[in-house]
């Protein structure tokens, strides 16, 4: 009978779960902290009273006390949060900011090939427009732009593209902005993400306007760590160059700023993204060689443990102390200390509980971070399911390989393992006939034992990879919307290579400080291993199966997954039939999330038009009465063709997945400007539409890239001009522009716009794109422009929305897709005045976020997110 691990042997694990439940309770149901404190004290007192009388009741009451303690912790954090000292200076106009760098700047290629540098710094003082200086401390992320046409900078400026370093002091004048989230359901909490990195405001400025000051800020320890990290990066790039250096810098010390987007996506597609970013696995890979070597050298347990902790601690500091690395190091230290003192907490689940509890006490909001959840789930999977499963399966075979030549050892094993050893000896006997020499029997046994051990190790890797894939389906679907169908073979190939690459690369870097010649061999081996990793990832990532994207799982499916995971943890230690049932339940729950599409959130019998918040761009979701879906435009960054930020992947797709959509029936491109077309390639790859609608085809590399993706996904391309009429899922579609005789120019222009009028019963919507006066006059003259809902042309620019055109449309509602604080001053005040003069209810994506309009055939209803 497999051993069971009762709750009393892992109290910290259950306490951590109870504390986490309390954090969720406190975050969702606010109560005064005194309430939670009183409840925790009452339950703890009752548990102490019953401890010697009713053990089960005492444990339940103690866990309840931890629940209320978790609610108290999150409540105290909310009330005790420090005020944002930079908030009064944000959104107020240009201010003069003085501060020092928190870390080295990051220099990389920006828009149109010109360099730009990202600087995170801490403010020392802020001067407003009247020159009043205020001492204010806060984190600011500054983007510095370098342009060749800039005039030569004055002495003491940062105009030349050189990397600024930790502690350097700077001064510049620019408007501060608070980080802004895109106002769509499913959007990433960018503001919260930056706040957790210590960034309270963002801004940008030309390099010639950034002044370097005398003196330094920060701490000596911070400056020393920055210098060491800078030196390591220089060695990495010197050893492996511009091709392999960025990837190795990301894998070894967490500097992933220079890794291109395509490489990131390949790792994400194959479920191996944890290899590219420094994670808990890296900590283990650094700790294992040190621990193994010191044990082989017969150092004492105390020295071995202390040295391993020091090495992993130093490595954590060099990786800029990312949250996953800190958590992994903390859990490793607890495990090593528990092992040193021979406590029951040697159980992996108990060590995990101690680490998680400490982290949550320090920062309760950590519970809601994706990295914490995925790290916790990964370790829980290995410790709670993987290790017991291996113990009752493959570990038996591994132990049976010990003393293979001894027949007496067979008597200590169960019959099946003894028979396996006998079979291996028979194979070795046959093999010995082909080996010359007097020690051929020992050589044959060594070869057979090595082959069998390698086979067992490979099966262990496959088993853990498959188990991790099942366990990580839920968080991967929630946070990355990927099913990771190729994660098992990918990790089976990549993880062993990474286990060799990490220490080998570190040895090469350290030897390079002595001699480049000494570092040549490990550096060359590292290069071969890296190419094996990236080649495997690129090959598997290019397969069509790797592109499986999934919508956000429902709450029911996530609860079913959690229940199946808990069942698998309990059953894996019981009889074989129960263990198989638990694993089957986990597999079924994972398959449900990965393979069974959820029901989209749609309103049947209604024509829906939703304007998404994509910043300074356009993207509209149209849902026909019969449920067919159309996406018109997909946003894009104006004038930044080389940006690693993709509106289609990072903003539009998450909204569609949040709605439960896994496929689109059609997509349309109004015209080929980057703020409309930039995200469409990712949308086509993610949602595999059947049709792509176009107007004209000017010369545009971005348009050609979209068409190439459409061909790859076998999307049918259709071109439309004025006068085209057809039915789309119960809604009438009429094309009002471009005119039939319109010819494309050498460059995309606003009047290329595909203008669509959608009708359902007596209600209609006019999607104007970026059409300007000339096209508006033609539509006004045609008599077909009348609509209840108007998507205002060209983001509210004065080049569109003429009085004549608005009089012809006579809309009841209007929506303007526009970016907050855009440099163009859109929407123009005169356009807003015209709409107000006609009593048009006007919505703006910069102010309201995503806005949905529902046309029921008679009238139009407007609805904002969350209402």
Image: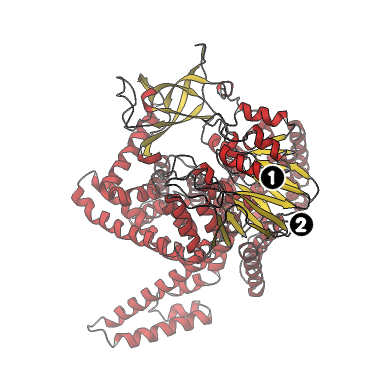
Element under disc 2: loop
| Residue 336 shown left or right of residue 66 in the figure | left
Residue 89 picture quarter? top right
Residue 195's disc is: none
Which residue in the structure is indicated by mark 1?
Answer: 783
Residue 151 rendering spot, x and y as whole percentages: 31, 24
Q: How is the image coloured?
A: secondary structure
Badge nearest the viewer, 2 or 1: 1
Element under disc 1: loop
Which of the pair 657/761 is nearer the observer?
A: 761
Residue 836 picture quarter? top right
In this rendering, is residue 380 above or below 128?
below
Which of the pair 629/213 is nearer the observer?
A: 629
- Residue displayed at 58% across by 25% down: 84
- Give the alpha-carbon distance from disc 2 to disc 1, as whole Å: 30 Å
Residue 14 in sight in this render: no
In this rendering, is residue 70 above or below 33?
below
Count the marks: 2
| Residue 155 shown left or right of residue 407 in the figure | left
Neighbour tally class for label 1: few under 14, some 14-19, many 20 plus, Cα within 10 Å: few
Residue 720 picture quarter? bottom right
Q: Quadrant of the N terminus?
A: bottom right
Which residue in the structure is indicated by mark 2?
Answer: 604
Residue 247 rendering spot, x and y as whole percentages: 37, 50
Compare marks 2 and 1 and give the one earlier in the sequence: 2
Residue 335 rendering spot, x and y as whole percentages: 51, 51
Residue extending farthest right: 858
Residue 768 in sight in this render: yes
Mark 2 and mark 1 residues within 8 Å of each other at the beta carbon: no
Which of the pair 524/549 is nearer the observer?
A: 549
Q: Quadrant of the C terminus?
A: top right
| Residue 64 shown left or right of residue 13 in the figure | right
């Amino acid at each position: 009978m497999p051993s069971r691990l009762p709750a009393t042997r892992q109290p910290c694990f259950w306490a951590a779960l109870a504390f986490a439940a309390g954090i969720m309770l406190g975050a969702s149901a606010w109560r005064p902290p005194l309430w939670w404190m009183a409840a925790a004290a009452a339950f703890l007192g009752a548990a102490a009273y019953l401890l010697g009388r009713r053990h089960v009741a005492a444990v339940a009451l103690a866990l309840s006390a931890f629940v209320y303690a978790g609610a108290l912790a999150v409540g105290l954090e909310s009330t005790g949060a420090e005020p944002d000292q930079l908030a009064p200076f944000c959104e107020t106009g240009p201010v003069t900011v003085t501060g020092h760098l928190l870390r080295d700047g990051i220099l990389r290629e920006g828009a149109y090939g010109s360099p730009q540098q990202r600087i995170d710094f801490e403010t020392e003082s802020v001067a407003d427009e009247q020159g009043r200086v205020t001492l204010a401390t806060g984190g600011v992320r500054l983007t510095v732009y370098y342009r060749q046409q800039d005039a030569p900078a004055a002495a003491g400026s940062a105009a030349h593209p050189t990397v600024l370093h930790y502690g350097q002091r700077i001064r510049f004048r620019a408007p501060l902005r608070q980080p802004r989230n895109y106002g769509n359901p499913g959007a990433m909490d960018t503001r919260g993400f930056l706040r957790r990195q210590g960034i309270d405001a963002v801004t940008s400025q030309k390099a010639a306007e950034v002044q370097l000051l005398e003196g330094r800020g920060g701490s000596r320890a911070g400056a020393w760590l920055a210098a060491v990290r800078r030196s390591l990066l220089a060695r990495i790039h010197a050893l492996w160059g511009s091709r392999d250096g960025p990837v190795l810098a990301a894998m070894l010390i967490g500097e992933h700023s220079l890794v291109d987007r395509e490489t990131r996506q390949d790792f994400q597609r194959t479920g191996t993204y944890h290899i590219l970013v420094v994670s808990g696995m890296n900590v283990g890979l650094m700790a294992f060689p040190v621990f193994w070597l010191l044990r082989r050298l017969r150092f004492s347990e105390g020295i071995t443990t202390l040295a391993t902790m020091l090495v992993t601690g130093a490595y954590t500091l060099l990786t800029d102390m990312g949250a996953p690395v800190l958590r992994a190091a903390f859990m490793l230290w607890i495990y090593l200390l528990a092992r040193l003192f021979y406590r029951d907490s040697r159980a992996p689940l108990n060590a995990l509980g101690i680490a998680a509890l400490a982290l949550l006490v320090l920062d309760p909001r950590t519970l809601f971070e994706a990295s914490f959840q995925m790290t916790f789930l990964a370790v829980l999977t290995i410790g709670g399911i993987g290790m017991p499963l291996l113990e009752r399966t493959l570990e038996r075979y591994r132990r049976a390989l010990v003393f293979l030549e001894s027949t007496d050892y067979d008597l200590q094993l169960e019959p099946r393992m003894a028979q396996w050893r006998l079979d291996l000896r028979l194979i070795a006997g046959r093999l010995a006939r082909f080996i010359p020499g007097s020690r051929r029997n020992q050589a044959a046994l060594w070869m057979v034992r090595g082959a069998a051990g390698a086979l067992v190790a490979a099966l262990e890797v496959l088993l853990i990879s498959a188990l991790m894939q099942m366990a990580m389906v839920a968080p991967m679907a929630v946070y990355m919307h990927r099913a990771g169908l190729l994660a098992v073979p990918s990790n089976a190939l990549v993880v062993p290579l990474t286990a060799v690459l990490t220490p080998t690369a570190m040895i090469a870097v350290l030897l390079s400080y002595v001699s480049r010649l000494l570092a040549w061999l490990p550096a060359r081996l590292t290069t071969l291993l890296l190419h094996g990793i990236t080649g495997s990832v690129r090959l598997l990532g290019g397969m069509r199966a790797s592109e499986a994207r999934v919508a956000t799982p429902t709450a029911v499916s996530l609860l079913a997954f959690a229940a199946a995971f808990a069942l698998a943890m309990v059953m894996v230690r019981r009889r074989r039939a129960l263990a198989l049932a638990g694993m089957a339940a986990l597999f079924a729950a994972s398959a449900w999330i990965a393979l069974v599409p959820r029901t989209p959130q749609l309103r049947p019998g209604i024509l829906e038009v939703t304007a998404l918040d994509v910043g300074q761009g356009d993207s509209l979701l149209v849902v026909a009465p019969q449920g067919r879906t159309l996406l018109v435009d997909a946003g894009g960054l104006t004038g930044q063709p080389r940006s690693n930020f993709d509106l289609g992947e990072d903003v539009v797709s998450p909204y569609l997945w949040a709605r439960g959509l896994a496929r689109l029936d059609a997509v349309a491109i109004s015209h080929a400007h980057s703020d409309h077309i930039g995200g469409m390639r990712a949308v086509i790859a993610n949602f595999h539409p059947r049709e792509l609608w176009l107007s004209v085809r000017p010369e545009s590399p971005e348009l050609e890239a979209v068409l190439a993706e459409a061909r790859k996904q076998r999307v049918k391309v259709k071109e439309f001009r004025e006068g085209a009429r057809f039915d789309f899922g119960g809604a009438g579609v009429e094309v009002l522009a471009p005119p039939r005789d319109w010819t494309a120019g050498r460059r995309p222009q606003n009047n290329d716009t595909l203008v669509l009028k959608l009708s359902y019963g007596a209600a209609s919507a006019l999607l104007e794109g970026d059409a300007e006066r000339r096209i508006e006059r033609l539509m006004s003259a045609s008599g077909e422009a009348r609509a209840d809902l108007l998507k205002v042309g060209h983001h509210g620019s004065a080049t569109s929305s003429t009085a004549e055109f608005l009089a012809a449309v006579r809309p009841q509602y209007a929506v303007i897709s526009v970016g907050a604080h855009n440099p163009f001053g859109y929407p123009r005040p005169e356009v807003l005045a015209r709409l107000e003069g006609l009593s048009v209810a006007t919505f703006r994506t910069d102010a309201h976020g995503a806005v949905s309009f529902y046309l029921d055939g008679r009238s139009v209803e407007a609805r904002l997110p969350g209402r």
